[in-house]
Image (cartoon, rainbow, N blue to C red):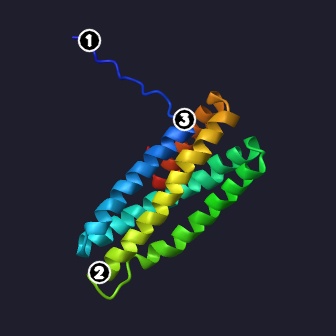
Amino acid sequence: MAAAKKKSTPQQDAIALLKADHKTVMTLLESLEKATGARRVKLLGQIEKELKVHTTIEEEIFYPAYREAAKKKDDQTMYYEAVAEHRVVDMVLPQAAEGENNEELKAKAKVLKELVEHHADEEEKEMFPRARQVMERAELRDLGARMEARKKELTGRR
């Protein structure tokens, strides 16, 4: 019997990789809104890890390439807004674990989710389509490969 051939998966481009990250984080945030106790703590840890890795690959690799390729004033503004939104999420995330009661914790989880949704929505509806206009497919695939390698480095996955 012949050995089964291992299927190679096509290389994700940068935008597909970032959208997949958005979906992962949004799923975790939806679970967080309903979670309590130890489950809540575990989810917050997962969300924090996912967001830190995602933010790092965006700021180190994708955003600089986007900024270089997209020269219009609106593009530059979009870049700076995206970086600023990362900082806001960084400030809110630790507060999502602090609260007097379950209702306060749920409210903070909802605010965090809304911030991340807003950011991801702007990227997916404005920045990513613009990136596809100003960047070549090959460049987006190369960025995706670099981002995937950096994710593995940051998470210790092989």
Q: Where is residue 4 in the image (x, y as percent from the top left)?
A: 29, 18
Q: Of the residues under marks 1 and 3, which one precedes in the sequence?
A: 1
Return the x and y of residue 143 as percentages of the image width and height: 61, 39
Find residue 77 and name its label.
Answer: none
| 140 or 115: nearer the viewer | 115
Residue 115 in percent (x, y) is at 48, 65
41 relative position to 20: left or right = left
The tag on residue 103 is 2
Could you tell me which residue is drawn at 68 percent across and 54 percent down? 79
Above or below residue 93? Residue 131 is above
The residue carrying mark 1 is 2
Can residue 26 be seen here? yes
Q: Which residue is drawn at 41% across and 64% down?
A: 113
Secondary structure type for disc 3: loop
Residue 140 versus residue 74: which sits nearer the camera? 74
Q: Distance between the residues labelled 3 and 2?
A: 40 Å
- Indicate which label's residue lies in the foreground, 2 or 1: 2
Q: What element carries label 1?
A: loop
- Picture coordinates of residue 19, whole percent (x, y): 47, 45
Query: Which amino acid type is shown beneath numbered disc 1?
Result: Ala
**N-terminal label among 2 and 1:** 1
